[in-house]
Every structure is written in C-alpha cells, then in structure tokens.
Amino acid sequence: MGTRHVIDPITRIEGHLRIEIEVEDGKVKDAWSSGTLWRGFEVFLRDRDPRDAWIITQRACGVCTTVHALASVQCVENALGIQVPDNARLVRNLIMGAQYLHDHPVHFYHLHALDWVDIVSALNADPKAASDLAYSINPNAPKSGAGDFQAVKEKLAHFVNRGQLGPFDNAYWGHPAYKLPPEANLMAVSHYLDALALQAKAARMHAILGGKNPHIQTYTVGGVTCVADLNPDRLGQFLYILREVKSFVENVYLPDVLAVAPFYLDWASIGGGLRNYLSYGLYPQKGGKEPENLFFPRGAVFDRDLSKAHPVYEGKITEEVTHSWYKYTENKPLHPSVGQTDPWYTGIETETDGKYSWLKTPRYEGKAMEVGPLARMVVNYASGHKPTVEAVSGVLRKLGLGPEILFSTLGRTAARAIETKIMADAMEGWLNELLGNIKKGDMETCVDAPMPDSAAGFGMTEAPRGALGHWINIQGKKIRNYQMVVPSTWNGSPRDAQGLRSSFEEALIGTPVADPKRPLEILRTIHSFDPCLACAVHIIDPRTNEVYKVRAV
Amino acid sequence: MEQKEFMEKHKMLYSLDRREFMLFCTKIAAVLGLAPSFIPKIAEAIEEGAKKPSVIWLHLAECTGDSEAFIRSTYPSIEELVLNILSVDYHETIMASAGDQAEELLEKVMRENKGKYLAILEGAIPTGTPPGPGGKPGGFLTIGKRTGMELAREVCSNAFAAICVGTCSCFGGVQAQYPNPTGAKGVEDAIGVPTLKIPGCPHNVVNSVATVVNFLLLGSLPRTDKYGRPLFAYGKRIHDHCPRRAHFDAGQFVEKFGDEGAMNRYCLYKMGCKGPQTYHNCSLAEYNDGTSWPVKGGHGCIGCSEPNFWDDMAPFYERLPDVKLPGVEATADKVGFALVGAAAAGAAVHGAYTFINRGKFRNREEEKE
C-alpha cells in the first residue's frame, strides 16, 4: 500500500481541481481527479430564448470563451436547419483561429512553463551563452542578443531583490526534476515576459471582429453582426496582428518547445495514459457539409493505431455518474439528450471508492477517450491531413524521434505547439477569402432565423482543450433542454462503473514522484492537458420539468 | 515636481519605456477624470512605492474571464503590473506553487499583511447546500479544505479593502440567474463584507487598473454609486455617450443584422440594445487597448454591468420597453417614463424602470437615487 497525497488547489489551470494520488516506490500507483465547483448551467438555460443561449453558455469559460459561443450558435442553427453566409463562416473561423493563437501560447508560457523552467536558476545564467543557445536553435530568434538577455536578467534580479516574489513565491525552485541549464531558463523567462505582452495584442484580433475579448459579442443565430467592421482598415489591422503572432509562434514558441524537449526526453515516455483519441474537427471550408468539409477532420483513433481514423457518430456518446456527485434513477450510461439531474454530494473528504467529483464521466462506444491537441494531431495524422503530417514529421525529424513519442506528456505539449503553427498558416487564407468576397461586393453576413415552435439540434466543435458538443431541444420557442459535454469532462472525469480511469487519472499512473510533498511531476502531466474546469462542471436536465431544490442559507 | 523634471529624474530607473508609461498615466487620469496636473503624481504613485501593495486574488464560482481580462492590460503592461506595481501574492491562475505550498502561502500573506492587502474577488459565492450526506452550506465550491464561502470570509475580513472584479463577484452573475440552483450570490451579499464593485462580463481592465491607481495615489478607493460601483466608470449610461446616439435621435435604426443600417452603424435599440439602461463607460474606454466594444461590433449591449442583468435584460434580442423614441420615428411600443429626457438632464436616474421579463423572472422595482 502506497501513501496518499492530496494536491488541492491545482493552480495554473482554469477552474477548481483537486488531485489525489497514491505513491508507491517513488511512482504514482493510483490517482483520483475531482472537480470541486458546480454551477448548474443547464438548469438556468431552461425556458430561455434559444437565441440567447450562446451569450449565456459563453460564460461557461472565460479562457476558451468563443468556443462555447460557436458550439451554441451552431447547435441552434442545426436545429433550425439554416446555413450561415460564407462571410459569417469566415469570420467565425478567424475568431476561432485567433482563440487558438492566443490560448496555446498563454498555456505554454504562463500555465505550463514553470513546471519545466526554474526561474531562480536563470539568475545564474551567462547572457552571452543564452544568446548563443537561442541562435543555435533558431538563427532568426528575435530579441536574442547578449544585451537582450542581460536586460532580462537585470529585470529579474531587480524583482527578486525587492523581496516580494508575488506569484513566484513558495514554489518548487531547486527541485531535482528541473533539468534545464541556467541559460535555457533565462531564455524561457525572457519569452515568458514576451508572451505576456504578445497575448494582450493577440486578443485584439478578437476585439476587431468580435467587439471585445474575452467574451466576444458579435455572433448571432444566423451569422455575425460585425458587417460594418468588414472593411480594409479593420481587416488590415487584423492581418498585421496575425502576422506578428504567427512570427512569434514560428520563431519563439515552436523553437522553445524544441529547445526544452531534449532536456526532458524521459517525459516522452511518461504520461501517455489512454490509448483512444477523439476529435470532432473544426473550421468548415467553403462548400460541402459537415463533417466532410472540415479543415481539421472529425474522427476517432483506437488503440493508438495511426493507420486508421474512424468516423464519429454523436449518438454513441454517453455519460454516467457512478463516481460523480449525482444520482441516476438507474445507474447506467445515458446519451446526453436523455440525461438526468439529481445532485448527491457526499463530501470532499470522502472515500475515493464512492463519489468524488462534480464531473460526470463521458464515454464513446463505452470507451474512455483522450481529447485535446494531442487527440487532434493523432486524428489528423491518421486521416492523412497533409499540413499535420508535414508539421509532425518535421518536428519529429528535428528531435530525431519516432511518432510513438507523441503519446506522452511531452507529446501533448508538442502537439499544442504544432497545431498552433498549422492554424496560424491557415488563417491568412481565410482572411484572403473574406477580402475576396468583399471585393466582389458580397457583404452578406447574416440570414433570417425564424424560431420554430419545436426543434432539436447539436453543435460540435473543438475547443483548445478538446471535443466540445452542445445539444438543444426547443419547445414553445424556448429552451426545453440544453446540454454541454465539454473537453475537461472527457479528460478530468472520475472513473466509470467498470473502474476504468479517464485521461488525467490514467496519465498519472507510473509518473515518478521524487518528493510527494513537492509534487512537481504531477503538475507536469496534469498541465499538459491544459485543464479548464469551469465548463466541465455542469449538469444535465431531466426530461421532466423538475428542477431540484437547494437549501439556501 | 514638473513633468519634465520628474521624467528626467526617473528615466533610468525603470524598464518601461517612458513615453508609453506617461501615455498610460494620461489614460488613467482621463478614466479617473483627473486634471492633467495629476499625471506626474500618478506616475510617482506607481513608481515610488518601496513596498508593493500585496494582492490576494480569489477565484470563486467563475469562468476566469476576469483574470483573462486583467492580463490584457497594456498601459501599464501586465508584466509591469505583476512585477513592479503590485505584489500578486496569491492568484491561482498564474502562481507557480500549488496544493499545500499554495495554501501555506495564502496563510503567510494574510498573516504578514493583515489589514493591509487588497483582496480582489473573481466569481460568485455559492451559498446553497447540496443535497446528500456531505452537503453543507457553500458545498458547491471547495478550495483546499474550505468552502469558497469560508475562504472568502477569511480573506475579505482581514483585507484593507475588498474589490470585486466582474459581475459574478459583484452581484452573483451568470450562475445566480433564475432559478439560481447553487444559491450563488455576490461576495458582499454572501458574507456581509462591504466590497467595491467593478462589474462587467467580464470587466474592462482599464477600470480595475484605474481603481488600483486611485488606491495607490490617494490611499483610498474611488467614490461609488449606491451599488458600490466607482462613479468614474459607472456614473453614466452607455446610451448617453454612444457614438450611435445621433442615429437614435434621428430615428435611424438597424432593422435586421447585416442590413443597410448595420453597414451605416445605425442605432441598435430595435435589435435589443440595453444601452439605455446600462451604466458603464464602454463607449468611452472601449476594450482591448481601445480596439472595439460590442456596439461597434454591431451587436446590442446586453447590460452586463447591471445587477441581475441575466434576468432583467433578457431576452437580449428583444427591445427594451418604455424607452421613448424621439424625432421622426417616435413610435415606441409604449410611451412610458421619459427615461431619455431624464438621462440627458444629468443621468441622475438609476435604473428607473420596471422591466417585467416575460412574467417569468424577477420584477425589478422602480427605484430612484
């Protein structure tokens, strides 16, 4: 019997997550992942105007923001059977692309990097050697002269000498699992700061077409509202910010991943977890119907078999609550559209044999699936998606490794960087298509969306963190039933009735833990998934009209 | 000290580019409504504090949208805010430590800075009791070993001041809308500690930064309205400063998204804009470094800085009743209280309306300040 350790709160994530691990002989033997916040989205969506759903569901997450907006307008449009104008498709693709270009670098530098980078060690770096290192990885590295790194080092020293370490206080500095030399640490600190400035600028792409960021406000059922901003001035601004961010991805983000990876190659065989991958696909291309017209294909890969991507049917998705703080009338998995609501909280200090999370447990064909950047790259690769095959092969060639290293903590982190590059490349094409339409005088941005008395539909897309589905049932022109099955529910959910673990828990098995009191290694693998719990904790409405009662204090 | 002399004295001391820094100070002075003579004082207040004010930022029932909004700050940059202006000692989204180390840190910061730190709150507090054997008040949210409610009470009652960012911590927000299944409330409502409120969904970072600068400059928090919102940002209605106001007055409206009126940036009142009932400075400050705001994006305001807006302002695509239309198209569905005229006289009327939302959601009482 190993020893039990709880990490709560897990920080540098969105939302409230608790991880409990059992450690034996310096390795994780078992793990339990708990979402510790419940907000009840589907309950308050009932009886609302279906046109308002996207505004409400967008507030499920302030990090992914637009992804719920998109899944929501798509599910209503699917119910209404309407096709949005080409310009709306392009604006939505550009807004989604901007989301990824903002979100992935923020994850890498501000949420994940400190698991690999020892900031304190950077104080011992030789700026000249740091400069040599940067240029050896990328001859075009910006702001990488010895003077640049000297300035960052001084800034860091000034900060540390003032004695208030703020967000960097009481961390794991000096932990034996940190392997980077001081120069690589200094380079990473420098890019941590550059990425902070860049993300504020990247968010302006959203503001140009979305009105503001986070939480855009230019979608509407039937299209987009920003017709007056579809002019050369605004789109020119968008283009130049896009190019600046793209340059950062190519010259800083991706090279940094390649620079750090060789020091942590052991992590290419740690944290693999599940063997099945699911992606709903995203970015509709001109003409055709979903899912055939998606730039990133929809598909599933089983048992890590990269030779075949299987088609995905939404009817095969189920959720169950064996270990979740809910009760079903019969304990069996249910399709989201017929799920039930009955919270049953047994307490946070409870035995992990019972219920231990506010997250339900989703399955596809009864199988646990990993979702997210790695799943997308795996599904794309298995589908023969050309830009993915080229980008993945290029990275593997530089590292001198085979595709099997993808199935790991390091692979997940690399997959995120690779797809950012693929998307950045695609965005300029959509912008040109949009300009082409405008040039032709096509300014159509929105179609009428008369609300039928009753209808049902679903919207499927990919959030940065993975497969996202919204389901709606409309009756009397109002929302009768609304459900979301979200990425961090797939990845962070508790085990199922058969005791099979979901992604977070499975990926932790076998992870080395040098010092359970300072569980840096656990954070590495958990952060590689980019957990985002705000939208993962929600409930499914029952078919009955009943909303359960809660005692208020 | 003269501005020039001041700049000379300090120019080598700090990493931020001087021109950008003074530009930031000018912007802050404008947001706060201060005279230009305050600009050097703002700069000094930010730069000279030997000990940076300690900040404990709590995440409650929320979506992290307000943290995301906060890190979009460009003047000053978020780097400057986090490294040189504030000491952000506890913030779960950015802090390096986790688990026990994070909890230890929180205890330490509270102990060492008792009565002096700023508590910044993001998210509502679920006060309801989940059904089941583990159910206790506030049990819908636990952080470490405590409920969100217990944690917020401890952090807020030992703070110099508690500042709510975003509508959730101010008024309960999205999860508090009918039927409010978790009993979510704004922080002040839930734990009885008075808070300054910077609502918005999420809030605009220029307003939280201006509030912090006010604190650094004067050692106090800015003047507020009766809901606790700073008057500099929430003293006037969107409608009063809307660049599309002239079209409202001329009776020129967008009739349908994407139409000729939309291309000409006509008034969005008929598309459901809640600007006439929303106190917020969006049209003046805009978002993301002055890039845009929802009405510029062609979509109506949803009233996100108002208490209970999720219930009171929905459905978002239906026009507000009782707003008298002026000019040639004075054909409002109902002619009610003369909101527009009263607002033009100085915007002293606060939410003076009764908006019954399809008879289903809360009724809002007519109220005057």
Image (spheres, grey):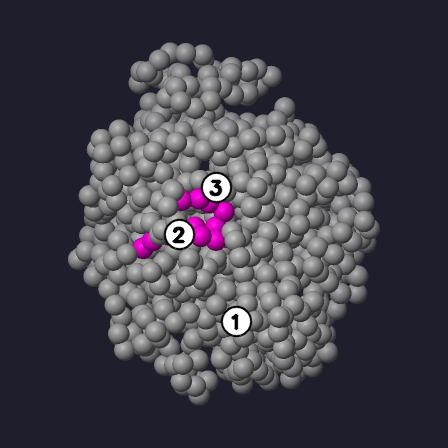
- Give, as a three-letter code, the residue at label 3: Pro
Earlier along the polypeptide chain: callout 3 or callout 1?
3
Q: Is residue A327 one of those drawn in magenta? A: yes
For label 1, count other residues whose C-alpha is less than 10 Å away and answer few (under 14), some (14-19) or many (20+): many
Q: Secondary structure at mark 3?
A: loop
Q: Compare residues B148 and A13 and report the one nearer the observer.
A: B148
Identify the residue position indicated by label 2 in the image.
A320
- Give, as a three-letter code, the residue at label 2: Glu
Disc sitting over residue A343 in the figure: 3
Q: Chain of mark 2?
A: A
Q: Chain of mark 1?
A: A
Q: Chain of mark 3?
A: A
Residue B244 can be seen, yes or no: no
Q: Are marks 1 and 2 in contact (CB under 8 Å)?
A: no
- Magenta stretch: give its range: A317-328
Identify the residue position indicated by label 1 in the image.
A509
Earlier along the polypeptide chain: callout 1 or callout 2?
2
- Give, as a three-letter code, the residue at label 1: Ile
Residue B180 location (% of width, % of height): 49, 32
